[in-house]
Image (cartoon, helix red, strand yellow):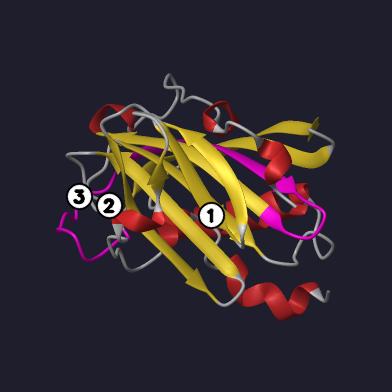
Amino acid sequence: MDFSRNHRFMTLIGCSFLCAANVTNASELATTASNAHQLTIFKQQLGLYFPSHWRLAHSEQIGTMFSAEFVPQQEFLTSWSSLYCIQAFKGLANAIEPELFLDTFASNYQQICEGEVKYQKLGASSIEGKQSYSAMLTCSKMPHTHRGESKQDVAMGEIGHYTVIAGADDLFLLHRSARGDDLLSATHFSVTPPLKMVADITTLR
């Protein structure tokens, strides 16, 4: 697959960069336990685990790109303190390496951040035989880019742990992020790696 044909997706590869927030019908997310969820991505079932008070706040598929975002029950996509996101790009695994994908993401992230950006590469790994790459990204002043649930224009510090996984066909981006006024320095805060919330990565093609 020609990567240039998928370039339009690269401007959307951060869930926090998406412009609309539409609450998805609850039937699209089957709950198997109080904190275990089965998410369907291009007919693939992925098990995700969250605290029981988290909810699916946004889910959509645009052509060959899928995204889903989870936040604590009482929070909104325009004013979250903690966010979990997974995106999938159908057929993109053979077009771009996970590290280059994250590099491109970091470049877009830097353009949106209104403050200082730090991009810390954590390196490559193999997850259930699948090639992956992880990194930390922080922004000392990140504007809110979602619209639709509520309005909040105050920029905040943000930190995120990102992992890109290359399946046999599809490429997956998982990230866990935190925001808050106390993160304006974005130097002392840490977040749980997103893979710790995945029950069975072997189901992804």
Q: Are marks 2 and 3 in contact (CB under 8 Å)?
A: no
The residue that appears at 41% across and 47% down in the rendered structure is 30
Residue 51 magenta: no
In this figure, which residue is indicated by the disc labeled 2? 77
Mark 1 or 2, nearer chain start? 1
With respect to residue 94, does 56 lie above or below? above
- Tell me the magenta residue range: 145-171
With respect to residue 16, does 148 lie above or below? below
Q: Position of residue 90 (x, y in %)?
A: 68, 66
Residue 151 magenta: yes
With respect to residue 125, does 41 lie above or below? below
The residue that appears at 58% across and 31% down in the rendered structure is 199
The residue that appears at 66% across and 58% down in the rendered structure is 104
Q: Position of residue 198 (x, y in %)?
A: 57, 33
- Characterize the local packing of mark 3: few (<14), some (14-19) or many (20 or more) Cα atoms within 10 angstroms: few
Mark 2 or 3, nearer chain start? 2
Mark 1 or 3, nearer chain start? 1
Disc 1 and disc 3: Cα gap in Å?
Answer: 34 Å
Residue 40 circle label: 1
Q: Quadrant of residue 149?
A: bottom left
Q: Point out the frontmost of discs 2 and 3.
A: 2
Disc 2 and disc 3: Cα gap in Å?
Answer: 13 Å
